[in-house]
Amino acid sequence: MRTFTRDTSSTSKRLKNELSRSDQSRRRSSLRFLHSGLVLLSTFGLFPTFASAQNVNIKWDSRRAFGYLQKVCEIGPRVSGTTGMIKQRTMIIDHFRQSGCEIRAQAFDVPHPQTGAPVRMTNLVISFDSTAKERVVLACHYDTRPFPDRDRVRPRGPFIGANDGASGVALLMEMAHHMKTIRPRYGVDFVMFDGEELVYADFDKYFYGSEHFARWYRDNPPEYKYVCGVVVDMVADKNLNLFIEKNSWKMAPKVTQSIWATARNMRVKEFIYKQKYEVRDDHLAMNQIAGIPTTDIIDFDYPYWHTTRDTARSCSATSLSKVGRVLLQWLTELPIELGDK
Ligand SMILES: [Zn+2]
């Protein structure tokens, strides 16, 4: 992913993007859970609270989930079109097949940003309850950036992408074990985007996979409809801080609010109900091209972003577990009322 503006330093971008509390509360709107038919505004008026569904008994296996992250990292760099990416894809497909999921691959070619030679991209769509006509997308990118450009010492060193790449993959791999238990009302598709950042220079194109997926959905409407979506990116930082991403707030306020509300009900304090960064990520194509209200759960405070130190050592099983549990609980609480604020 990238920050919204191109020309300023990341630090100043981050500072500029901080939003005052009053500004934030002005923009807040209430949200209703249809299945409980109840709206409760908190006493302080700062945060909408909800009558939550019964907490489901989720036996999230932190060690197993983190094991997936390590396994993905052990492959090494997973740049689109490379053998590392092909290895990872085989591993992912095997995993979800064993879990009894339906898997579709969406392949397409793009010109390599440096040579112009075709690069084969493959999005993966993994379906649960595949006959359901109303569906939710949980997505991540599974390619890694070619180089750790922000590394001061080794900007052309190896980039493993433990948080920026593997964390989303590991999260969905573990979630697959729990989908039968939680039995969400909607069908669920896990979507893994290729080509999120086949980027060698800042002006290279991002988001090949999500844009392809979004155009396919817009131009060839399937029999089912995606009611909303969630993108996860960098969700395993040891020091997890999940602020509300600004584009998500603008484009998918209700989806965003509902997830942060679930986290609050579960007392997962790493979901911070405050806007901070404006990030361009795969959720933009989902919102703007596909018209699927989609939020981005992203820890943009990660100090090792695009450096050689984005390795499993900088990540935590606990962080991954927190995000996974919130998302599983949130899926059980759907549907929410979507649409305009
Ligand atoms: Zn990245």
Image (cartoon, rainbow, N blue to C red):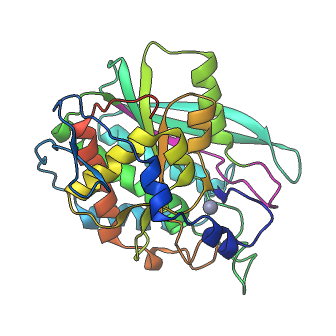
Q: Is residue 23 magenta?
A: no
The quadrant of the image that shows the N terminus is bottom right
Residue at the far bottom in the pictured view: 153
318 shown above or below 105: below
Mark yes or no: residue 126 visible. no
* Quadrant of the displayed image that contains ligand 1: bottom right
Give coordinates of residue 106: x percent, y percent. 58, 31
In the picture, measured across the screen, residue 141 lies left or right of residue 45, that is: right
Tally of numbered tags: 0
| Nearest the eye: 260 or 220 | 260
- In the rendered image, residue 56, in percent from the top left (x then y), is placed at 13, 46
Does 255 appear above or below 25? Answer: above
Q: Position of residue 143 (x, y in %)?
A: 60, 53
Main SS type for the magenta part? loop
Q: Is residue 99 visible?
A: yes
User: Is residue 192 shown in magenta?
Assistant: yes
Nearest the camera: 234 or 51?
A: 51
Front one among 286 and 98: 286
> What residue occupies the far top of the structure in this picture?
223
Which quarter of the figure has residue 267?
Answer: bottom left
Residue 181, quarter of the rendered image: top left
